[in-house]
Amino acid sequence: MKNINLLIFVGMFFVSTLSFGQDVIIVEEEKEPSKFSFSGSVDAYFRTNFGAPNKGENFQAPASSFGNLPGFSLGMANIIATYEGEKVGAVADLVFGPRGEDAVFGSPLYAGGMAGSSQIINQLYVYWNVTDAVTLTFGNFNTFLGYEVISPTGNFNYSTSYMFSYGPFSHTGLKADFALSEKWSLMASVMNPTDITEFNPFGTYTFGAQLGYSTGSGSTFLNFVYGDNDGKLINNGDLIPGQVSYGNTFQVDLTTGFDLSDVWYLGVNTTYNSTSGGEEFDGADIFSLEDNNAGFYGFAGYLQASASENFAIGLRGEYFSVFNNGLEGVVGTDPDGDGNVFALTLSGNAKIGNNLTLIPEIRLDTMSEEDYFLNKDLAGSKSLSSFLLAAVFAF
C-alpha cells in the first residue's frame, strides 16, 4: 500500500510540474507588439499634351507642382520609419526622386546650396503625448494647410492643384495639438519661415493655428499662418541695389470633406494668401515699400464616386487667381499683375490588389489671359489639355 501511495504521489508531482512548466512556457512566448513600423510608397507616370509640344524648350505643362514631366517619368520613392511609444515617438520620412526633390526644395541650405542629405528629408520629428488631450511635436513636419498632400497615396488626383502648389509644403518648429472634445481640436505652432526646414537663416518666425471639427462622416479644418518669411534687410555692406525683403505673409485656409452617401464624397478647399510690400535697398539706404499687398486666392471642389470596391472616379474643379503680381510665371496676368486660371481634372482610381493604384487622368487648364501656353504650331493659346497615367504602390 505504501508503494502504491508513493507511486500516486510521484505521478501527481510530475503532472503538476509539467503543468507548471507549460504555464511558464506560455508566459515566455507572449511578446509586446513591436513599436517600430515601416511604410512608404513608389510611383511613376506617363504624361502627354494634346495639341501642344511634348519635348524640347517648348514643352508645355501647368505651373502646378509634381507630375509635369514629359513622357514616362519618375515620381518618388518614400520610406517612413516610425517609433510609436505610449508617451513618446519619432518619425523619419525620407523621399527620393523628382517629386521628392520638388517637395523639399527649400532644404539645400546646410550644404551651401549643394545636394546635401537634408534634400531627402520630407519629415523628421519627435513627439510627446503629455496627456491624453495634449501632444507636443518638435522638428520638421508637413504642412497642416490645404486639402492635398505631398505623397500621392494621400491624394485622389495625381496632378496637384495650384492652391496646394503655392501654399506651404513643410514647416520646422514646435506645435501643440489639443483635443478639446471628441469632435473639436486645436493646434498652435511657432515655426521657421515657410519651407525653410534645416535651420533658420533669417531670424524671423511664423505662427500657425488650426481649429478642427470631425464627425463620423467627415471633417473641417480652419487654418492660419502668419509671419515674415525672408527676414529684414540690414545695411552691412553686403546688400545689392534693388534687393527686396518682403513683409509679413498671412494665409487663411479652409478644408472640408464629408461623405454624401455610401457612393458619393465631396471635398472643398478655399484659401487666401497675402504678403505686404516690405522694404528695398536703393544702393544707399533701405526704404519701406508702399503697403501694396500681393498674393493669391482660390477655390477647389472635389467630387468623387465609388463604382465598386476597386474603382472610383473623381472630378476636381479649381479657380485660382493672382493679384498684384503675387506669383510670377504661374498664370497669365494683365498689366496690373492680375490673372486667373480655371482647371478641371478628371481622374480614375483602379485598385490592383491591396497595394497598387492606377490613376488615368485628363486635365484642362484655361487661363484668363491669351498666349500663356503654346499650341503644336507654337502659336499662343490660353488653354492646355493633357493626359496622364500614374501607378502608385503603397506598402
Image (cartoon, rainbow, N blue to C red):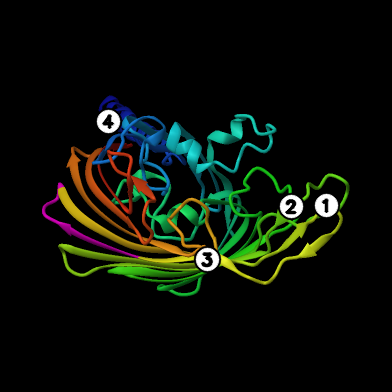
Say which residue label 1 marks.
283
Say which residue label 4 marks.
8
Secondary structure mostly taken by the magenta-highlighted segment of the chain: strand
> Which of 389 and 284 lies nearest the eye of the viewer?
284
Queried whether the magenta region covers residue 359, the answer comes back as no
> Which of 263 and 178 lies nearest the eye of the viewer?
263
Label 2: how many residues lie within 10 Å, few (<14), some (14-19) or many (20+)? few
Q: Amino acid at mark 1?
A: Gly
Residue at horizontal 43%, vertical 56%? 332
Q: Amino acid at mark 2?
A: Gly
Q: Give how far apart the Cα atoms at labels 4 and 3 are.
A: 104 Å
Q: Which mark is residue 336?
A: 3
Q: Amino acid at mark 3?
A: Asp
Residue at horizontal 60%, vertical 54%? 194
Q: Which mark is residue 242?
A: 2
Q: Marks 2 and 1: CB-CB under 8 Å? A: yes
